[in-house]
Image (cartoon, rainbow, N blue to C red):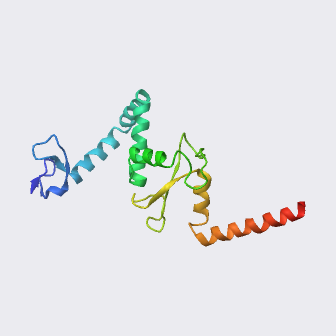
Amino acid sequence: MIVCTRCKMSKPADEFYRDASKKNGLTGQCKMCKRAAIEAYRVKDRDSYYATMYAYRARNPEKARAWARRAKLKRQFGLTPEQYDAMVASQGGVCGICKDRDPGGQGEGSWCIDHDHSCCPGINSCGSCVRALLCHNCNTTLGRVGDDPEILLAMIAYLGKHATIRRLEVS
């Protein structure tokens, strides 16, 4: 049990954040007190907080971009930028479905990270159900059909049927 320096309550070690610079490896304030202190600072000095953050981003755009990329990949897909780059390399820099080299969509080099929605519904993934990197068109097509192979097979049959009719009309 550890005593919080702020609320003076005795709490178990898992109620404290890790801090390698401290002797016991934990912060002095419990998680609840630490969160409250951070929120109080944000509310009290909101303009100062955001001004500092925006000034840092303006001075260090590359670092800010790299940090944002790392945070999004980790939060949304459980991946590191190194794992993402390894996926791009293993696919030869092409879409996992149509083999196009242009990822399309928004942002520079923004391949869509496809994951199995039966494992993790929604846009976030646990990381273990990531399938491949796709271009924007292939990713949205899979999303619109709900990853349903039956619909995709029906689409293939439909295109095959109408391609034959067009060829007969042209001849």
Q: Which residue, as the protein is rendered here, is positioned at the far bottom?
A: 150
Is residue 8 shown left or right of residue 168?
left
Task: Please report the residue visible at 58 percent of the width from the left and 61 percent of the height from the top.
Answer: 142
Would residue 12 be found to the left or right of residue 33 on screen? left
- In the rendering, at what x and y percent does residue 136 appear? 59, 51
Q: Nearer the viewer, residue 36 or 19?
A: 19
Assign the C terminus to one quadrant of the image. bottom right
Q: Report which quarter residue 48 is drawn in.
A: top left
**Residue at the image position 13 percent from the left and 51 percent from the top:** 4
| Most distant residue in the front direction | 171
* Camera-nearest residue between 91 and 22: 91
Residue 107 is left or right of residue 6, and the answer is right
| Image x and y of residue 86, in percent | 43, 46
Towards the viewer: 156 or 11 = 156
- Tell me: residue 118, above or below residue 29: below
Residue 67 at x, y = what percent?
39, 39
Q: Residue furthest top?
A: 59
Q: Which residue sits at x=45%, y=49%?
A: 87
Q: Position of residue 102 (x, y in %)?
A: 60, 44
Residue drawn at (53%, 48%), measured in percent from left and top?
Answer: 111
Residue 81, above or below 125:
above
The number of numbered discs placed on residues in the rendered structure image is: 0
Corner quadrant of residue 157: bottom right
Position of the N terminus by quadrant:
bottom left
